[in-house]
Amino acid sequence: MKKTVLFICTHNSARSIMAEAILRHLYPKHYEVYSCGTQPSGIKENTKKVLSEIGIDTSQLYSKHLDEFKNKKFDYVITVCDSAKENCPFFPGGKQYIHKGFKDPETLEDFREVRDEIYAWIEEFFKV
């Protein structure tokens, strides 16, 4: 049975989307993965670009609000930016809560750096 994971960030436009896509890409048979934001604002173009650069399809990704998941249970609820941790310190339905902060990317190079940091952390934390 797959473990369930929810990544949370403020806008669900970069870091949480990257984490969702990367974990789903690396371990599709082991994890059911979602992401959302406390104030979703749509996916940034650079997010799509840097994921595509490493062979991840972004066509099914979209920015979602936290409320979409309020009645769902998760094995892991992970905040990936300080703002989301402050705005959503507790998400009912999570078995384990984790905060792993990544900087808010601004330039294309920042997006690549954050993507690589998230990728490395996911490989280490979720390895099967």
Image: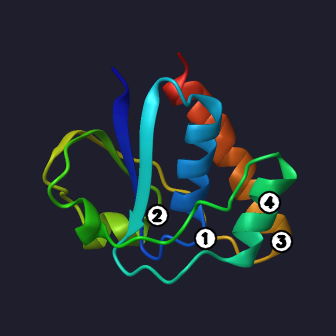
Q: Earlier in the sequence, mark 2 or mark 3?
A: 2
Is 77 positioned to the left or the right of 31 in the image?
A: left
Q: Earlier in the sequence, mark 1 or mark 2?
A: 2
The answer to whether 64 is drawn above or below residue 72 in the figure is: below
Viewer-side label of 2, 4: 4
Residue identifier under label 4: 50
Q: Are marks 4 and 3 in contact (CB under 8 Å)?
A: yes
Number of other residues with Cα within 10 Å of mark 1, as a class: few under 14, some 14 to 19, many 20 or more: some
Q: Are marks 1 and 2 in contact (CB under 8 Å)?
A: yes
Residue under the point 25% across and 59% down: 69
| Callout 2 amino acid | Cys
Q: x, y (%) of residue 10? A: 42, 74
Is 109 positioned to the left or the right of 82 in the image?
A: right
**In terms of secondary structure, where does tag 1 sit?**
loop
**In terms of secondary structure, where does tag 4 sit?**
helix
**Real-space Cα distance between discs 2 and 4?**
19 Å
Number of other residues with Cα within 10 Å of mark 2, as a class: few under 14, some 14 to 19, many 20 or more: many
Residue 91: name its quadrant. Answer: bottom left
Residue identifier under label 2: 81
| Callout 4 amino acid | Val
**In terms of secondary structure, where does tag 2 sit?**
loop
The answer to whether 78 is drawn above or below residue 26 in the figure is: below
Viewer-side label of 1, 3: 3
Q: Earlier in the sequence, mark 4 or mark 3?
A: 4
Residue under the point 34% across and 73% down: 65
- The number of numbered discs placed on residues in the rendered structure image is 4
**Real-space Cα distance between discs 2 and 3?**
18 Å
